[in-house]
Image (cartoon, coloured by chain):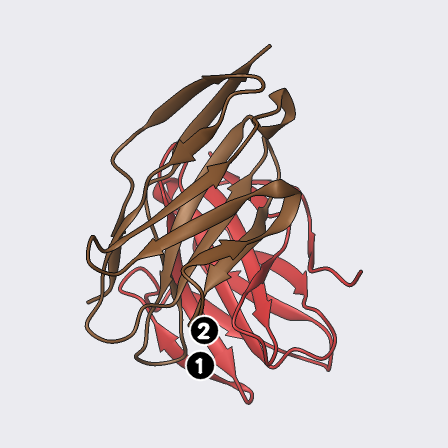
Amino acid sequence: EPEVTQTPSHQVTQMGQEVILRCVPISNHLYFYWYRQILGQKVEFLVSFYNNEISEKSEIFDDQFSVERPDGSNFTLKIRSTKLEDSAMYFCASKGVRDEQYFGPGTRLTVT
Amino acid sequence: AQSVAQPEDQVNVAEGNPLTVKCTYSVSGNPYLFWYVQYPNRGLQFLLKYITGDNLVKGSYGFEAEFNKSQTSFHLKKPSALVSDSALYFCAVRDDTGFQKLVFGTGTRLLVSP
């Protein structure tokens, strides 16, 4: 069964550094999303991406964040200058013609 | 704005007993409701959804959910709990604006004791 994959599984970085989180969505899906989950809290929407552009973003998704789909398979989330409060689990999700979104296993980002 | 509420932080049930994890929703239009499960250090796995049709929705691993429009609820149920069902369960509603992001509840931890 096809699945969403994410790399790395765990990323440790210093405050102020740039990080890129990578995702490979399910191949025939057209809608892509990033969510995050701060430890012990609920899952929060960050951004959605469709037709090679951002379709919606939350208040969390400020100028430090960017997304792109550089080729036909990868979908990346970049944080330009990480802050301590960016420490969280980041989930990528994709959706096809059906209603449900399929989530990857997540990348745990730790900012020190 | 769409929202869901999960009133219980934790539900404890003995193996073999029926389980219910509660969820209520608030939407401006038709509700599109989902349940996801999260095992430790894992991503979110889709369990089931309600879009339209029968109020009792069947999903993966023997789970089902009952949609109740008058009570604006979408409770997750299973007739006989397994220890392996112990996990974090999230109710979510699809936002009908924009590109259909999911709005999640705060999650309910289910603990099934042997």
Mark 1 Cα shell of 10 Å, populated few (<14), some (14-19), many (≥20): some
Residue sitting farthest toward the bottom: A51
Q: Is residue B107 above or below residue B64?
A: above
- Which quarter of the picture shows residue B34? bottom left
**Chain B tint as drawn:** brown
**How many dots with numbers?**
2
Q: Earlier in the sequence, mark 2 or mark 1?
A: 2
Residue A45's place in the image compared with B100, above or below, is: above
Q: Decide if residue A30 is on the left or right side of residue A65.
A: right
Numbered disc 2: secondary structure? strand
Residue A21 circle label: none
Residue at 46% in and 39% down: B77
Q: Which mark is residue A48?
A: 2
The C terminus of chain B is located in which quarter? Answer: top right
Camera-nearest label, 2 or 1: 2
In the picture, which quadrant includes the N terminus of chain B?
A: bottom left
Numbered circle sitting on residue A54? 1
Is residue A15 among the parts visible in the rendering? no
Q: Secondary structure at mark 1?
A: strand
Subunit bearing disc 1: A
Query: Does the residue at mark 2 contact the one at mark 1 (Cβ under 8 Å)?
Result: yes
Residue A41: image location, x then y, percent: 35, 38
Going by the numbered disc 2, the residue's amino acid type is Ser
Residue A28, image x, y percentages: 72, 80
Task: List the single residue furthest toward the right.
Answer: A1
Residues at marks 2 and 1, CA–CA distance in whole angstroms: 6 Å
Q: Position of residue B92 (x, y in %)?
A: 38, 55
Is residue B67 or residue A49 the one in the foreground? B67
* Amino acid found under the numbered disc labelled 1: Ile
Point out residue A65 in the picture as x, y percentages from the top left corner. 42, 65
Chain A colour is red
Q: Quadrant of residue A35?
A: bottom left
